[in-house]
């Protein structure tokens, strides 16, 4: 079952009249996986297990996970991992969590199910508080560019995910000991490629190594195959053998407003129009803190500017995705 099917199952359940009762329906026959509703209209996912052991999970706001004994008509008493969505705004995310858990446990013996449930909840904890509708066009375009660079240029590895600092306030989007990359993406399809430099620090020299600017122009295209979601899912799949790196990437994606259940900008598909890598060296057109040695003029608290890439041809490198390494 997919997340939308779980949501429909919950919507069809009546609300019980007593706080001692749950209305429940088994989503897959004889699977021991049930959707349920309590009298406060909270959605539950029940997964039958073989004993009432503790659930070693950190608390997640709006999500309750415990092992409880429930009595289901015709089944008798049995222990279940009981997941409860306490925040109505997170119901779409809860549907996705439920779908992943059901897929993971449906063929597992009851004695091995608790760990599968816990792993799924831990994977989703990064996205639990993310509003599925908050990713703006500007945010999506910027995130697309950084994920595209991670895939096509740097390569999806644990070290390169660590180097991706665009989600945690680092000066540059990617930072290695000898190389830093600032990624700029535009979806403007006419005229010169022009990027907004958000502040004076964005094109300042790194503490060590060389600075490059990666310029990407993309265009919305319903026939294209690439989207923020597609790039994110592909990267997470490549990191499946490395849980720590995968968790690192999920945390960074969530910090940027991405969630796997988001629609809209997260699933908008783009065609890559042009891309190039520029060495930000002597004479490169930029404004930095050094431009204002005495500080910004009185009353000016910040500065951004537009960079026309047609003026940067002398600093363009011959690097291509296949030839460049950090």
Image: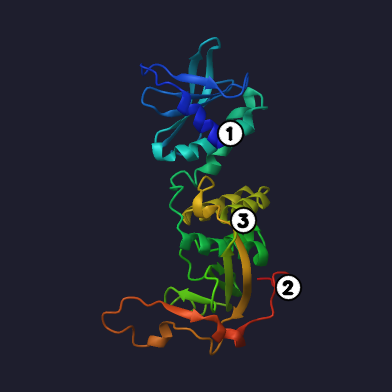
Q: Does the CB distance between marks 1 and 2 fall below 8 Å?
A: no
Find residue 35 and report its horizontal and vertical position in percent. 51, 25
Instruction: Report the residue marked by disc 2.
Output: 323
Q: CA distance from mark 3 to mark 1?
A: 23 Å
- Relative to the observer, which residue lies in front, 184 or 199? 184
Find residue 268 and report its horizontal and vertical position in percent. 55, 55
- Note whether residue 322 is visible: yes
- Note whether residue 55 is visible: no
The residue under the point 40% across, 33% down is: 86
Instruction: Report the residue marked by disc 1.
Output: 101
Query: Which class describes the residues within 10 Å of circle 2: few (<14), some (14-19), or many (20+)?
Result: few
The residue under the point 43% across, 48% down is: 131
- Relative to the observer, which residue lies in front, 175 or 282? 282
Say what secondary structure mark 3 lies in.
Answer: helix
Say what secondary structure mark 2 lies in.
Answer: loop
Asked which quadrant contains residue 14, the reply is top left
Quarter of the rendering occupied by the N terminus: top right
Give the mark, 3 or 1, whose residue is nearer the N terminus.
1
Asked which quadrant contains residue 23, the reply is top left
Q: Does the CB distance between marks 3 and 1 fall below 8 Å?
A: no
Say what secondary structure mark 1 lies in.
Answer: helix
Q: CA distance from mark 1 to mark 2?
A: 41 Å
Give the mark, 3 or 2, whose residue is nearer the N terminus.
3
In the picture as drawn, the residue positioned furthest to the left comes out as 299
Instruction: Report the residue marked by disc 3.
Output: 231
Q: What is the count of numbered marks?
A: 3
Tag shown at residue 12: none
53 over 221 or under it: above or below: above
Q: Please state if 192 lies on the left or on the right of 15 as rendered.
A: right
């Amino acid at each position: 079952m997919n997340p939308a099917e779980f949501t429909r199952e919950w919507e069809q359940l009546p609300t019980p009249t007593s706080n001692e009762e749950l209305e429940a329906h088994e989503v897959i026959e004889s699977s021991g996986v049930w959707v349920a509703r309590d009298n406060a209209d909270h959605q539950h996912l029940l997964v039958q297990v073989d004993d009432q052991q503790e659930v070693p999970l950190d608390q997640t706001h709006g999500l309750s996970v415990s092992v409880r004994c429930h009595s289901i008509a015709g089944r008798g008493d049995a222990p279940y991992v009981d997941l409860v969505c306490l925040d109505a705004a997170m119901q779409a995310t809860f549907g996705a969590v439920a779908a992943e858990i059901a897929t993971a446990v449906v063929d597992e013996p009851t004695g091995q199910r608790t760990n599968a449930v816990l792993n799924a909840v831990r994977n989703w904890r990064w996205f639990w508080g993310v509003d599925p509708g908050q990713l703006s066009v500007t945010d999506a375009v910027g995130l697309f560019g950084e994920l595209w660079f991670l895939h096509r240029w740097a390569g999806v590895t644990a070290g390169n995910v660590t180097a991706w600092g665009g989600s945690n306030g680092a000066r540059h989007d990617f930072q290695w000991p000898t190389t830093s990359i600032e990624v700029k993406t535009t979806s403007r399809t006419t005229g010169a490629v022009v990027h907004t430099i958000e502040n004076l620090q964005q094109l300042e020299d790194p503490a060590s190594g060389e600075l490059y600017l990666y310029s990407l122009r993309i265009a919305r295209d319903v026939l294209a195959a690439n989207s923020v979601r597609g790039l994110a899912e592909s990267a997470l799949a490549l990191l499946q053998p490395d849980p720590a790196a995968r968790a690192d990437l999920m945390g960074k994606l969530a910090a940027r407003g991405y969630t796997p259940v988001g629609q809209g900008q997260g699933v908008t598909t783009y065609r890559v129009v042009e891309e190039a890598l520029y060495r930000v060296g002597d004479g490169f057109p930029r404004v930095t803190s050094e431009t204002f040695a005495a500080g910004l003029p009185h009353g000016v608290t910040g500065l951004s500017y537009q960079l026309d890439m047609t003026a940067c041809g002398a600093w363009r490198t011959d690097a291509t995705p296949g030839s460049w390494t950090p």
